[in-house]
Image: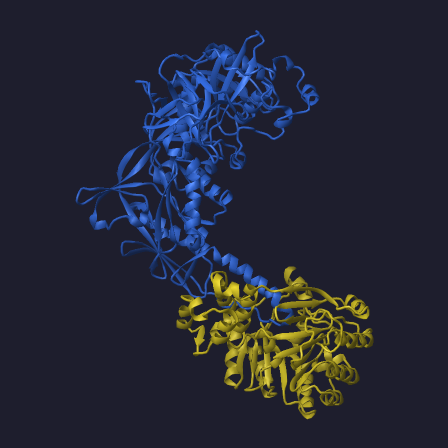
């Protein structure tokens, strides 16, 4: 944390008078009128993280030297690589306004992806205002709109910020973007702040707007405690660290608290605020944002959206909006080597300590052995979990094609939930199958309307409406089966619109579908991990494509391999992979042995990642084949 | 078995496909012989060099092999000096196999007789083909008639153990020319035939031509068909296939090569030569200059050596025996504490059903069909090495 002072002075001398790094923290000066709780709403790459960094720098929370390790809030390497926020962060800044007033600004970061929209809604609930950041060259995107609407519904004060105004191309686009924003939130042109987080333009205006336009929190420090959990993380030493916004009452160490939805009580160990690191204050009062620990071992006890109150003086008004987060997308995760099953179980267990949205249950597959059926909030969440397993826990895993959870009504009128296609009951026992639908919002330049309509229709979508945001920008809404979206829909959407379309969706309801189970057989043996549930009318085409793709992905073997797609006992498509004719190095004498051994060992490592069904060796990519069908 | 290999790194002309270390100038051949005599001393168990892995070993050598290069470029006198020195410094079994590689274009009846007298009892001729265009493609300096003549000379000189090399899958070769080459070779009735599918070895002129697109390599299907033709023709003619590329009349398997393939020990001398003693493999400097400098300074001319782990030993033993005359089940269990039959299930069952492998009760052995996909079977087979931690990893 220590820096060379002269360095900082020389870098940012002009706003030295704003910097209040020597401002001593004291809870007594924390009058509610001087708190501001806000978040930033922005699309990926529109500059949210850079703006956050700049605000931290300008308020002296981070130094110029620390700024060189870009983007402080996205501290997970995965977040930095993907340029998105996954875990929530919050940070408190001390701000001395030119008026002479001292403020405490709580910036609450929000996750940047549709998979985490519930978490977004909870962190918005913790704020009184939001910066709406829109890229001056890109305009408004779907996700920005849905998050903005969520913020408006919760009555947040919106401060529009047009970012990246220093980009040369902004000259031609900025007027249009300004108009989009004005139409969207009905603001006046002068209410928009023109900024460049990268170049440090407009930062002072933004800070002033935060204190001037965002109302201070309301609440009664004397009332029974009401605090909203907007995030919690697992710390190996202290247990769960719960991040809260206090609405009423006061959190004090040693208080006995109650989680109202999980009905768990704990005694508070440590209470504090969030600077760059956690800073213990012992107390957190109404209007403020901070953290507490209470020797909580299970993340599941402190659910996002739950209300924290005092066990002996509970509030009778729990904070609204809590819901149980349910996984929507499922996939099998198997150890590449069957011996590693227990390691994988342990890794998943550890992952759920800091990501309670994952569900996992043991399952077995004839092709893949013992593994887990895991549930995720969405596709991105799934990818993140898979990557974390590999990177943070060194697991070598095989993942199966994702699917949704189907609702099966049996002939006996019983309801069965099926999240693994291989477990679909025999068709004679099925009365109907229902699948989850989403309401998808797509925003794109109007020239792509036809392309997008075609793509969504192919995915069994129906259009619910379209609005023009401006002459050349359209907002379309579709009702679509989620099951069609989990197969590379987003990639297809992006590639067919040259990246211009943005997508957001919310889950709607289950609807009946003409769905059938399609099995894949290799040399006559069904490979359960390749089974999928598909729409009857698309089954033939789907089967054909899948067989062709598998032929491409499964290498030639010592034996001919027959690939078949079947529905029940009816084969709907077939392909075959011819056998290897010859594979042997002719010569192996004294000088060749070492080299040859190393070559064979290398090939062995390659084969290790293959799974064997009967005589057929299947590479891992094949279990994903469906995802890369054209 | 205990082998002894000597590398003679000189050729009149280098063949485009060959990646063995060899020089086209024979200018330094006399100096080379003297240095080789010194290395014989250095590696000898009866000399106090102190650094040789074979030190103190009194076991008799069962084979001596002069490879190259072209060992037949050595004069009979030089050969005689080397052989005499070997007898002085090593224990060599009276019935040892003494092989010398020869270019059919560089032999005369007198020279062959002199080599025989010096102690060589097995010859290996690099015949490769009886079709002129193929010999030209391979940069061979001899023609078909010289190959025939060389065989006659060898027999007249008293060699009753002669190998001929044959090459197939040579660009431009057809099933017809291969069939012709095979019948011409069989007319000469060699005791042993090494039949290789042409390999494009990295760093050879042939490889460079392939990369430049100047050569169309034989397709996998034709290569496989040619290999099948070789196997059936030679098997029908009474040769037994005892390795991927090697065929012998009964009792005429090359003892020296079996030393490699059975995981036995061998000492190696000369530039680039690789030796293997117990668990250690060493290899000499590749360049004649580096090798000479070291030896003349009284040091072992090793570029490096590696000690194999038990897993590596197991992998080598399995892949070498599989590509040769089969893996002896009892011996395997004795060496590595693993029951191979169960370690290879369920694949072994599939291979036996498909006719790739035969389990004759004592040995798992590839069939002709099995040799064709030998590397597939091998890679699959060696996988168990990682799966048997207990016995295998503790026995080392």
Residue closest to the eye, A255 or A261 = A255
Vertical placement of residue A164 versus A189, above or below: below
| Residue B73: quarter of image | bottom right
Name the colour assigned to chain B in the rendering.
yellow
Q: How is the image coloured?
A: by chain
Res B208 seen here:
yes
Q: Position of residue A478 (x, y in %)?
A: 35, 31
Task: Name the image quarter holding the N terminus of chain B.
Answer: bottom right
Return the x and y of residue B395 as percentages of the image width and height.
53, 66
Indicate left or right for A226 with A61 as reference: left
The answer to whether residue B366 of the structure is visible from this angle is: no
Single out the residue that lies furthest toward the front.
A254
Residue in view at x 53 percent, y 79 percent: B241
Q: Number of numbered discs present? A: 0
Which chain identifier belongs to the blue chain? A
- Identify the image quadrant of the C terminus of chain B: bottom right
Q: Is residue A413 left or right of residue A45?
A: left
* Nearer-the-camera pick, B194 or B67: B67
Q: Residue at x 20, y 48 (%)?
A: A429
How far from the left and from the top, in percent, is residue A450?
A: 41, 33
Relative to A78, is A26 above or below?
Answer: above
Q: Quadrant of residue A293?
A: top left
| A19, A575: nearer the viewer | A19
| Direction left: furthest residue | A412
Q: Is residue B41 above or below residue A329?
A: below
Tell me where residue A486 appears, x and y as whole percent. Answer: 39, 40
The answer to whether A571 appears left or right of B162 in the picture is left
């Amino acid at each position: 944390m220590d820096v060379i002072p002269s360095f900082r002075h020389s870098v940012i001398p002009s706003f030295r008078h704003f910097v209040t790094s020597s401002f001593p923290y004291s809870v007594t000066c924390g009058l509610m009128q001087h708190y501001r709780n806000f978040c930033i709403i922005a699309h990926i790459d529109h500059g949210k993280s850079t703006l956050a960094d700049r605000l931290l720098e300008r308020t002296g929370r981070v130094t110029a030297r620390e700024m060189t390790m870009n983007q402080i809030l996205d501290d997970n390497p995965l977040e930095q690589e993907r340029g998105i926020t996954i875990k929530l962060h919050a940070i408190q800044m001390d701000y001395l306004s030119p008026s002479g007033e001292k403020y405490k600004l709580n910036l609450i970061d929000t996750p940047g992806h549709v998979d985490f929209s519930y978490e977004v809604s909870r962190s918005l609930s913790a704020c009184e205002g939001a910066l709406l950041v829109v890229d001056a060259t890109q305009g408004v995107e779907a996700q920005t709109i849905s998050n903005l609407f969520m913020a408006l519904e919760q009555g947040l004060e919106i401060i529009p910020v047009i970012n990246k105004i220093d980009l040369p191309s902004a000259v031609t686009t900025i007027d249009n973007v300004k108009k989009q924003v004005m139409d969207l939130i009905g603001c006046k042109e002068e209410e928009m702040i023109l900024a460049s987080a990268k170049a440090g333009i407009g930062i002072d205006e933004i800070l002033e707007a935060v204190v001037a336009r965002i109302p201070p929190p309301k609440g009664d420090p004397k009332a029974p405690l009401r605090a909203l959990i907007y995030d919690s993380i697992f710390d190996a030493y202290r247990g769960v660290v719960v991040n809260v916004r206090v609405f009423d009452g006061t959190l004090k160490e040693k208080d006995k608290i109650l989680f109202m939805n999980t009905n768990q009580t704990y005694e508070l160990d440590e209470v504090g605020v969030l600077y760059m690191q956690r800073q213990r204050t012992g107390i957190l009062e109404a209007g403020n944002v901070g953290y507490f620990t209470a020797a909580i071992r299970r993340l599941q006890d402190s659910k996002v959206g739950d209300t924290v109150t005092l066990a002996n003086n509970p509030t009778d008004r729990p904070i609204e909006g809590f819901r149980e987060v349910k996984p929507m997308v499922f996939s099998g995760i198997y150890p590449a080597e069957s011996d590693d099953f227990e390691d994988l179980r342990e890794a998943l267990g550890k992952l759920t300590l800091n990501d309670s949205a994952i569900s996992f249950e043991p399952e077995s597959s004839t092709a893949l052995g013992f593994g887990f059926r895991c549930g995720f909030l969405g596709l991105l969440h799934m990818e993140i979990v898979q990557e974390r397993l590999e990177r943070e826990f060194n697991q070598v895993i095989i993942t199966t094609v994702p699917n949704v959870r189907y609702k099966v009504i049996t002939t006996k009128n019983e309801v069965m939930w099926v999240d693994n296609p291989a477990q679909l009951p025999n068709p004679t026992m099925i009365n109907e199958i229902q699948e989850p639908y989403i309401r998808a919002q797509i925003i794109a330049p109007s020239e792509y309307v036809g392309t997008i309509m075609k793509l969504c229709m192919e995915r069994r979508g129906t259009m619910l409406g379209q609005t023009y945001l401006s002459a050349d920008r359209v907002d379309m809404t579709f009702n679509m089966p989620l099951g069609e979206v989990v197969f590379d829909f987003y990639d297809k959407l992006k590639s067919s619109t040259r990246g211009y379309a943005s997508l957001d969706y919310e889950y709607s309801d289950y609807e009946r579908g003409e769905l059938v189970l399609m099995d894949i057989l290799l040399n006559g043996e069904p490979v359960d991990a390749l089974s999928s549930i598909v729409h009857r009318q698309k089954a033939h085409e789907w089967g054909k494509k899948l067989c062709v793709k598998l032929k491409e992905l499964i290498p030639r073997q010592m034996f001919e391999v027959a690939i078949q797609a079947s529905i029940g006992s009816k084969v709907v498509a077939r392909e075959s992979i011819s056998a290897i004719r010859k594979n042997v190095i002719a010569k192996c004498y004294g000088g060749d042995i070492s080299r040859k051994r190393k070559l064979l060992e290398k090939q062995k490592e390659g084969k290790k990642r293959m799974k064997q069904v009967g005589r057929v060796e299947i590479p891992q990519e094949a279990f994903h084949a469906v995802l890369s069908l054209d | 078995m205990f082998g002894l290999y000597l590398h003679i790194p000189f050729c009149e002309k280098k063949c485009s496909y060959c990646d063995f270390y060899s020089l086209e100038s024979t200018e330094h051949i006399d100096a080379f012989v003297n240095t080789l005599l010194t290395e014989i001393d250095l590696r000898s168990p009866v000399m106090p060099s102190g650094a040789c892995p074979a030190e103190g070993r009194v076991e008799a050598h069962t084979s001596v092999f002069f490879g190259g290069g072209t060992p037949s470029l050595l004069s009979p006198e030089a050969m005689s000096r080397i052989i005499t020195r070997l007898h002085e410094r090593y224990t060599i079994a009276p019935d040892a196999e003494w092989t010398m590689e020869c270019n059919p274009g560089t032999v005369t009846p007198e020279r062959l007789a002199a080599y025989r007298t010096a102690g060589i009892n097995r010859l290996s001729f690099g015949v490769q083909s009886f079709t002129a265009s193929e010999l030209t493609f391979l940069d061979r300096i001899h023609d078909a008639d010289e190959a025939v003549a060389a065989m006659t000379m060898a027999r007249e000189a008293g060699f009753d153990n002669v190998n001929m090399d044959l090459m197939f899958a040579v660009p431009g070769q057809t099933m017809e020319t291969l069939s012709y080459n095979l019948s011409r070779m069989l007319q000469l009735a060699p005791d042993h035939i090494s039949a290789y599918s042409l390999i494009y070895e990295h760093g050879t002129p042939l490889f460079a031509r392939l990369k430049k697109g100047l050569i169309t390599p034989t397709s996998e299907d034709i290569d496989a068909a040619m290999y099948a033709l070789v196997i059936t023709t030679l098997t029908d003619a009474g040769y037994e296939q005892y390795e991927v590329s090697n065929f012998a009349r009964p009792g005429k398997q090359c003892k020296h090569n079996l030393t490699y393939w059975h995981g036995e020990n061998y000492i190696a001398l000369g530039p680039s030569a690789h030796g293997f003693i117990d668990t250690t493999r060493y290899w000499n400097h590749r360049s004649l200059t580096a090798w000479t400098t070291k030896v003349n300074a009284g040091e072992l001319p090793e570029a490096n050596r590696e000690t194999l782990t038990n897993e590596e030993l197991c992998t080598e033993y399995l892949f070498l025996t599989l590509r040769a005359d089969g893996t002896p089940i009892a011996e395997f269990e004795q060496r590595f504490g693993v029951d191979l039959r169960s370690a290879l299930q369920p694949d072994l069952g599939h291979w036996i059903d498909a006719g790739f492998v035969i389990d004759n009760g004592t040995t798992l052995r590839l069939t002709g069909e099995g040799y064709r996909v030998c590397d597939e079977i091998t890679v699959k087979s060696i996988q168990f090495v990682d799966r048997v931690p207990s016995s295998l990893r503790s026995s080392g």
